[in-house]
Structure formats: structure tokens, C-alpha cells
Amino acid sequence: MTDITGPPATGVVVAQPGRSGELTPWRLLLRRPTFLAGAAILLFWVVCAIFGGAIAPHDPLAQQLLATNIRPSAAHWFGTDQLGRDVFSRVIAGARDILVISLLATTIGTVLGTAIGLVMGYLGGVADILIGRLVEAVLALPLVIVAFLFVVALGASPLVITVVVGFVFTPIIARTVRSAVLVEAQLDYLSSARLLGEKSPYIMFTEILPNVVPTILVEFTVRLGYAIFTVAVLSFLGFGVQQPTPDWGGDIAANYVTLGAGYWWQTLFPALAIASLVIAINLVTDSVEQVLAS
Amino acid sequence: MTTTDAPTGPGAPAGPGATGPTVQAEHMDVIYQVRGRDRLALRNVSFQVGQRESYGLVGESGSGKSTVALALTRYLPRNGRVSSGSITINGQDLLSMGPATLRALRARTVSMVYQEPGRALNPSIRAGRQVAEVYEIAGQPRHEALERAEAMLRKVQISDPGQVMDRYPHQLSGGMAQRVVIAMALASEPSLLILDEPTTALDATVEAEVLDLVSALRAEFATSVLFISHNLAVIAKMCDRVGVLYAGELVEEGPAREVFDQPRHPYTVGLLRCIPRRGQRKDHGRLDTIPGFLPPPGHTLTGCVFAPRCALVEDRCREAPPPSFPINLAHTSRCYRHEVAPDLPRNTPVDLSIPAATDGAPPLARLVNVSKTFTSGGGVVHALERVNLDLLRAETLGLVGESGSGKTTLARVLLGLIPPDRGASVELDDHPLPTDVRRRSRDQLKSLQIVFQNPDSALNRRHTVRRLISRPLARLAGLSGQRLRDRVADLIRSVRMEERHLSLRPSQLSGGLKQRVAIARAFGPGPRLLVCDEPTSALDVSVQAAILNLLADLQAKEQASYLFISHDLGVVRYLSDRIAVLYLGRVMEVGPAETVFAGPHHPYTEALLSAVPSLDGQRSERIRLEGEIPSAANPPSGCVFHTRCPRRLPTGECEATEPPLAEVAPGHHMSCHIPIDQLRILQRADTPT
Amino acid sequence: MATYLAKRIGLALVTLWIISLIVFFAGQVLPGDPGRAILGNLAAESSVRALDHQLGVDRPLLTQYWTWLTGLLHGNFGMSTQFRLPVEPFLRAALVNSLKLAVLAFVIVVPLGILGGVLAALSYGHMTDRVISVTGLSFATVPEFVSGIVVIVIFAVGLKLLPVSAAAGPGASPLSQLQHLILPAIPLILILFGYIARMARAGTIEALNSDYARTATLKGLKRSVVIRRHVLRNALLPTITVIATQTGYLIGGLVVVETLFNYQGIGNLIYKAAGTKDFPMLEAGVLLIGVVYLVATLIADVLSTLLNPRLRLGNSG
């Protein structure tokens, strides 16, 4: 019977009390093609970030003034740039800084955001109101612009970018954690803990925190995607990793003037590298989110 | 108001000229495909609903009763399908129907009323338009459809239909919304009305009204009814015939009275023994329980589905599923041993000796002048108003009331989770307790513990059972090392679980087991007063019985007092020594359990008691409550119950002054202007027994 | 409703004030010595001092903030250090240009995104859904300059269909202006499409699975009527708010797109101000973006309140 007017099936919607232990979340993840594709691409870039120099066929910094603007060929898979540097090698080596900065920034944001979010959600009160307004204000400004404002004021360096992006993420993550904590705060196990005379820090970190970890996990991967996005944009605008260090955004900015002359490979390949990385992360995030939701 | 329960002939189509049954389901199998695997949700289910007949389906969760409703409306989720068998409605084959025919069937022949009326209505369309839509489908112009919708709303006894027409669903109370849904369902004058747990989400007094309404309309519209419920008493009241579903199979079927009075399937027998009835108490005539668990969904049992839990099981039961044995012309049972089924051996002893509560000793705890006012959205809500209650040693005080009566607030104030208003005090052993739990000493914390309604919410889902039970012991009883481990093992066994359960997390346990863990956890520190806040209302009847007996056993052993909160009067009566009735945050009546139940009672207690359908088949002429429960933000003047009280005095006294909680008999207090003797006369006149 | 509106505006003003603090902090406190920052390391100490004095940054912070804030309230957004002219006319012209681009992107993407999301939801779990969801998600997360470059490579360099530069010459016809705006609008559209479609999809799926959709279907309504009358309205309400929230991201995207296509909008203005350390221009620009965002979300809130009876009428049952 195919019922054309029936509701869409939603996996576990059925009146079946789902017994657990059928498939673990991890095995469910491994069954999703989008997750596998995303994870494979991500793994590739992580390998590049770690072993960049060893894998790259050429020195990403070596300029060959006799071999500038060469089209993609067997010797130079992605061609060479205006200074005769091998684009393929620069793309491989360029994975490192963006990944390291994004990962660190996201970690800073997640750790701080989680702590603040727990306090806001569980203790509430003045802290909640004040931080809540601050979050609103930060959210009112495009992420790129806030980051950009601070980077301009403090000067561009990997450290500044990491800290600024991490700080900008903090209130956003805090807000997500806070709403997850508010959901938990409705549950009776917290009353139960209070009836045992447990103190607030114990309740926040031992009772609540483990229950909001899935939310934090998803938020971390989502933010990692945004961090890469932001770091790439800052680099492109000239406020990120500085030349001649190989960097996708920076390389695009340095070469895109030559687009008009038809040297598309100098910008297209770094662009595709960024695209593949952010898409990979989002495929992973999306899968994790779906699996945790089901 | 009339109650139309006159049963028509069992299964027989009523009236001459009738042609065949309204619903005929034959050997129906329903399969859900879950993660690539087929799970049988219904197996070989056959039943008929005759014309104008009311057929009830009862079953616990997981029995597949809602799946029947979905199959009959062809609204199974995409991963579900009727894999074999046939369904005909009014002689039409449902399963082979094309989309247009199916739509026409839904528009004209079959209607449905749902469990959660609030969610069944579209939140962004006015109630009137949603009812009128049914007439528009039938081809009527809009203004006419609206007029007829208003007339229909009047039929479902909405006193001001014009006003309700213009409301959005969120502006309607649960009872009102359910009336609108019923109006919508009957607007097409269907041949078949399916009611899926229509009153489960409603309060007892509202439930009674809705059930009466359905009975009256059923007679008026000459509709066949398929009534689905977990509540056997509701089915007994509403249905001519009944089918009992267990794990996707229809195990017994027959005339409702006969099935409930002389069940012939061990499951039905066991299930009926799980329901507290008049005369049964925690210490004598105890509830029986059904051992074991429901087979997991998608089970592949070759024999009888109930065999693993059945005390009458024989080898043949495990070998092949039993056919349907006729008991008489109208009554069938799928049990090889249907003849001896009524003699199913008990799983629980009948009596238990519980030491009587010590009379004359000072109370263990007392609530003195407790009021609680919440401010929300600019309004002030009086959740509790000058409540005084004593809790005696080793007694169970049952706390009864409908939603919004303040039961849970009272418990939370006692526990120190919510501060009461100024002037209130909570005492333990004649010493005032700090009103904030954070300022209570370890001994005070140990003395007061709670079992919550929903173990999913009350147990931290990331912690193992071992951790959940150990933590209170380590913190409040100061245990550690081997002594801690021994005590944890003791506790888990005392709630009839095994040590292997200790390493599991709550999600790996069934609802009943989770609640046992919660009970073990609460008993850990050795509380002298345990608050039980609706501890069984999220559980199935068979699980509830086991939990109630467990609570009684533990009380006998540990000599703890219980404050037992429930909306279910049968459950409260089974367990309680004394009972307090709450209405709008005030104590209406408090006294020994049997006195309160026997009467004379407060008019509100009387209404509550007569609202509850009973399995024993006594049809007392009910007293009916008018209108809805007033908002606690704006309580009525004088006696807060006067707006709904059917026994209101004509003198105007009830409207003017609030009656004091006066002692009307030793230990029996009541807040009512009507003298007790007059109440006795009034109430005796109305009760046939 | 009136009190709700007053409360909502009050909150927006508080938020705006906090934004001003952030901007002031980033623009005037963090750089330490703006004069030195502007003139560079080689400039003479005396000229740095003179510039600092001219900028007023040698006064106490509180005084500086007060002067700046009162200036803003009087419509005085400060003097550009780069052009030595009031910043206000620059901002105004740039804002108009940016709005053109943003409006074009919105007009195209809002119906497209909603349509995509609803289509995906209606074919939940099938190929159409997977394709729309995965591409939408991918588009939404790729930085604008990346998709911008791909677009340029394809349409301008490869197919030579459209101009690379977004700015048509002065006095160009509206049609030619539009032609120049199409390429820069694409990266913005791609990003927004993903967000809007995702939201519309989630809302529609929820509404399709709701009890009231079941009620409507079992009334015997056609699926198309169920969807139109019962599902879409409830499904798309939350999407309105999301669309407004996206204005923030949209403006962030403008910085990149306007730079990439050399278009004289607010993003480009801010970018250039940052490059020349023109702090007054930068601060005023960022603040202006905050105002635009707050106004957009305010409108969206009011709109969704008007459309949602639960919010409009409150709980009077």
C-alpha cells in the first residue's frame, strides 16, 4: 500500500518504543554517505596540514622566475602563479594555518562559551541579562566585521586572529549552551540533586554538563565551519596570514587581479580548496546533528 | 444530561435494514520498516464494528492500538504498511482505494478524535473556520458553512458558540478544544467515529463531561464508534463490545461487561487484577502483578505472545500461536487454556502486614499556614492559599486534586525547592525547617526525599544506575568503599532488580525499571518522609500495580511516611491512610481515607468521585460540575468552589464568605458552608448504593 | 501590542548602545595611539601629537566616548581622517549602493529559498530533498569570495557573458546597472539560499508531521489544500525571522563581494577605511550596519507577531 496522502516517515516517528542498542550513533554515522564523504575530505586536509611539506611536490615558497603563470600540466598539476611558485604545493601547504587557527579559535570559543552558558543558564540573574544583551549586540554585527574591526585595531597576526575569532564565538556558543541548560533546568534530576545538598558547581559540571555535551559537540563543528569561513575571509581581505606564507585566502587575494588575464588556476584551485574544506565540515556536522537528533 | 450506556446486542447490527458491519478488519498484519528491518506491529488482527455499535480497543503502550486507528484511516507513517489481510469500511475495500475515493471516505464516512485536542487544531486558524471547513468540503458556500459550524458547536454543548468560533486554539481550554474537535468530527455525520484516547489528556471532571457528550451524540448521530483507550474503566463505560490487544495481537474479544467480569485470557485476567478497586488496600486484597516484560517490538515468537509471562503456560503455547477459541457466541479468547484462565495463579501474595500508624504521637511533619504566590507576566497566581496539613508517622497521606490545584507546589514547598510566602512554616519533629533546601542540614536532607512522576526527567540520563544509587548514600549517609557497595546491592535487590542492572544507564531500562531505580535512590539515605509525586501516572497499569506494591512493601519495612500525590482516586485510595483534597490551592477536605471515600464528602470530592468511571459497573447518578476550573490568577470570591458547586446554598453565603476548614467528625475536616448532616442527606439521596 | 512594540524598541536601543561601546572600544581604545597608527612608525613625535589632539584622542576616555556619542546623536558621525571631510555623505552614498545590491539579492533569493525548502520537505528523504539539502548546505558555507571567483571564472572569464566589475559607468541605464549587479549578487544569493531553504524545509517538515496536518488530511482535504492552507502558513512563520537575521550575514558578505567586484558600497567603504586606518569612518560604518540589522529584525519580529495569533493575542483562554 502506497499512501500518497500519508505523512512523511521520520525514521523513529512510529508508535514503536525504540529499544536502544540496535545501532550505536557511531555506526549510524558510518552508514551515512554524506558523513563518509565529508570525513574523507576532512581527513585529506588534516593529513596535508600535518605533513604538508613532505607531501608537496615542490617547495611552496620557491619562486621560479622563468616559469611564471604556467597552465596546469604534468609538472605543475595546478600550474604556477605570478612568481612562478607551484600552486599545487601552495594549496597543500596552505591547509595548515587555516586549520590550526580555526581549530584553536573554535576551542577557545567553545570552552569559554560553555562555561559562561552554564552559568547563565543555571544561575540566571544579572549575569544572564548582561551577557544576553552582549550576545545580542555581537550578533547584530556581521561576524566578519566584528573580527575585522578588532584585527584592524590590534594588527594582523595568527595569534590575534585566533583570539579575536575565539572571543567573537564565545557569546554565540554561550547562548546555545544556555538554551540547552535551560531545557535541562526543567528536569527533575536537578531538583533531586538539590535535595542531596549538592552545590551549584557540582550540579553545573557533573550533572548538567554531560547532558549538554551533544549540543556542544554539534555547536563545535558548526562553529568550526564558521571559523574556517571567517579566517579565509580575513585572509582574503589581507588581515589574515601574511604573504608569502602559503594560505588559500591570501593566495586568492594576491592573484585574483590576474583573473582578467585568464590565469584562472591561480585563484580557482585555492578557492576550491576552501570550498571543499568547509563543505566537508558541514557534511560531517549535518550528519552528526541528524544522528544525534534521531 | 442523560447517560446512554444501554448496550445493544453484542456484535449484532442494530435495527432492521442494516447491511453488514461498519468496519470489518480481517487477519490484518501491519509492518513498520525500521532501519531496514521489518517489524510486525499488528499480527493477524480481526474484528468488526457493527452499525451503531461502540467497540472498544484496550491495551497498554506498545500493544498497537493506535496503529489500528492509523490503519483504519490509511494514515500509517510512510515506513508502515498493512502487509496482509483486508479492511472494509461500509463494505468498501479500504486498502485498494484510489486517492479520490479515499478522500471521499475520509470526508464523509470516517472521522477521528485525538488524544491531544490542542495539537489537533491548526494554531493559526480560528476554531470556527476549522469546523466550517468540513462543510465546505461537502460543497457548501462559506457563509452557510460558518452558520452550520456554529450550530454544530452548540450541539457539543458550547454555551457561547459565537465567541468560540472567533477564538484561536491556544485560547481554548483542553476540554473546550476537545469539544471543537468532536464537533469537527461529527460535522460530516460519519458512519464511523474513531476516538483515540480522547480524554487521556483531560482532568477527571472534564473527562466525565466529554464522555457523557460522546455518549449523547453517538445516539443522536447513529454513529458507529471505535474507542481506543488504555483505561479499562472508560472502555467499560463507553463500549458495547471490547477487544483486548497485547503486543500487536487481539487476545480476547467479547461483550464489554462479560470480558471485564469473566475474562478468559490470562493477560486480561492479570491486567484486571492490576487495577485497584473498592475494598482493595495496600495491606489486604492486594493488587496482583504480571511478571516479566512486553516482548520487544518486532519480536519473532513462534507461539502465543503472552506465553513468556503466563503462569498457565504449557508446551503447546510455545509451539504454535493459539487460534481464537469461542467461549460463547460473542466471546472469544486466543488461549489454549481459556477454560482455566480465570484461575491464573497470583504473582503477589494477597495480604501484607503493615504496622498501623502510631496514634496519638506528635506528627512527623507539618505545614503551617503555607501560601505561595507566583507572579508571571504581570499577573499574580495564588498557587497555595493558607494550607495547614499534618503528616503522621509511618502513614500515607494522599493528596488529590485536578491540574492547577497546587499539589506539586505543595510538595516542592515541603521539600524546600520553592520558598513559600512570608508567614509560612514547615516543621519536622516540631522544629522549623529552613524553607530553602540549601540551608537544610544533612539530617534534614536525609529525612525528606522524593520520587518524581517521570523517571526520564528525574534520573540523570548520563549516569549509570550504580552512580545514581550510590551518590545519595555517599553524600547523605556517609558511606564509602565496601559498605557503600553492599548497601547499593541491598537497595537494588529491595526494589526487585538485579545487580547486573547497576552498570546500565536509564535509557537501557523500561519505564517501570527506571521508576524502581528512582525509588531505590530515594530510599538510599533512609528518609522518614518520602514525597511521591504521581509516581505511577506515566506507567502502564500492570507496571503501576508492581510499583504501588513495592511502595507499600518498603513502607512496611522502613516505617517511612508518604505524601502520595495523584490525580487517580483509585490509586490514592489503595495506598493512603488519610486523604487531603485540594482545589485551587486550598484544602477542601482532609480525613481518614475510608471516611473521605464513604462520605458524606465535600461537594468537590463528591464530584471528583462520581466523575471517575468504575470497572465495577455501578452507575451512580453523577453530580455534574458546571463550567471550567477557574484560573488561580483570579479565584472566585467566597468559597472558591462556588462557581461550579452543584450544591451551592441559595442563601448567597457561598459567594460571600470563605468557609473555614472545620472538624466535622474526629480527624475529618471540611471547608464547606453546608452542615455535614445536610450533606449526608443530600448525598445519600443521590447514590443508589 | 503597543507595549510589546515599546519593549522591543527599548531592547533594540540597549543593544545599539552596547554596539556603540564595542565599536568605541575597538576603534579608539584598542589601537592605543591612533595618531601613531595612522601616521606610521616613521612620523615625527610632534606630528603624531598634533594629530592625536586633532582627533581628540589625548583626552580622557570617558570624555572621548561622551563627545563621540553625543556627536552621533546629533547626526555628527565624525570627520574622515583619510579624506578630511565629514563621513556622513560617504556613508549615505555607499549605503544606497549596497542596498541596491542587497535588495536584488533578497528579491531573488527569498522566493527561491522558500520554494527550495518547501520542495525538499515535500519530497522528504527522496532524491530531490537530498540534492536541495546538500547543495543548499554547501552553498551556505562557502565564503562569498570563493563562490565569487568560481562565478567570475565561469561567466566573465570563460563565457565572457557578464562584466567583472559591478560598477556601471556614471549615468548608466538601470538595465545596464542591473547587468553589472548580477554577478556580485550571485555569491550572496548562494549563501542566503542555503539558510533560507534549510529553515523553510525544517518548518515545513515539522508542520507536515503535526497533528493538525493529520486532522486536515483526515477531514478529506486534498493534499494541495492541506499544504496551502494548513501547512505553509505555520511552516513559514519562523522563516521570516531567519530571513531578517540573515541581513547581518548579508552585510558581512557585502564587504567581501564589494571588494572582490570593486563596488562602491558600505562594505567596500569599511574595508578601505580599515586599510587606511580611518577610524571615524570605520566606526560610523560598523555602527550603521548595526542599525540596519536592528531595524530589519525589528520589522521581522513585528511582522511575525502580526501573523502569529498566539503572539498577537496572548494567552487569554
Image (cartoon, coloured by chain):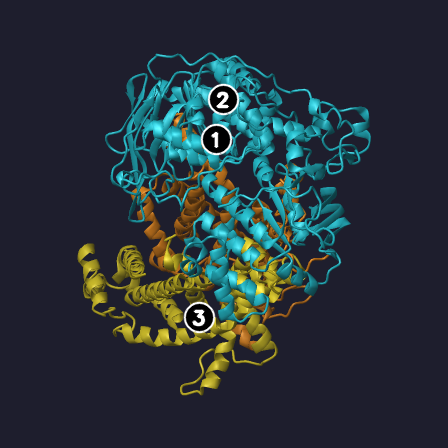
Chain colours: A orange, B cyan, C yellow
The answer to whether residue C84 is left or right of residue B542 is left
SS category of the residue bearing label 3: helix
Report x, y in % for residue B220: 57, 53
Disc 3 residue type (three-letter) = Thr
Residue type (three-letter) at the residue carrying disc 1: Leu
Q: Amino acid at mark 2?
A: Ser
Question: Which residue is the site of mark 1?
Answer: B569
Residue at the spot 45% in from the left edge and 44% down from the top edge: A180
Task: Residue at 65% x, 25% y: name it.
Answer: B291
Per the rendering, the mark at residue B261 is none
Say above or below: B285 vs A288.
Answer: above
Q: Secondary structure at mark 1?
A: helix
The residue tagged with tag 2: helix, strand or loop?
A: helix
Q: Are marks 2 and 3 in contact (CB under 8 Å)?
A: no
Of labels 1 and 2, the one closer to you: 1
Task: Indicate the position of residue B226 as horizontal and vertical percent values.
Answer: 63, 47
The spot of residue A64 in percent (x, y) is: 58, 65
Q: Please, which chain is the residue tagged with disc 2 on?
A: B
Q: Chain of mark 3?
A: C
First-in-chain label (1 vs 2): 2
> Could you tell me residue B611's position as x and y percent?
48, 37
Determine crowd level at label 3: few under 14, some 14-19, many 20+ residues with C-alpha closer than 10 A: many
Q: Which residue is mark 3?
A: C259
User: In this orientation, does residue B118 appear?
Assistant: no
Dots 3 and 1 on the same chain: no
Number of residue marks: 3
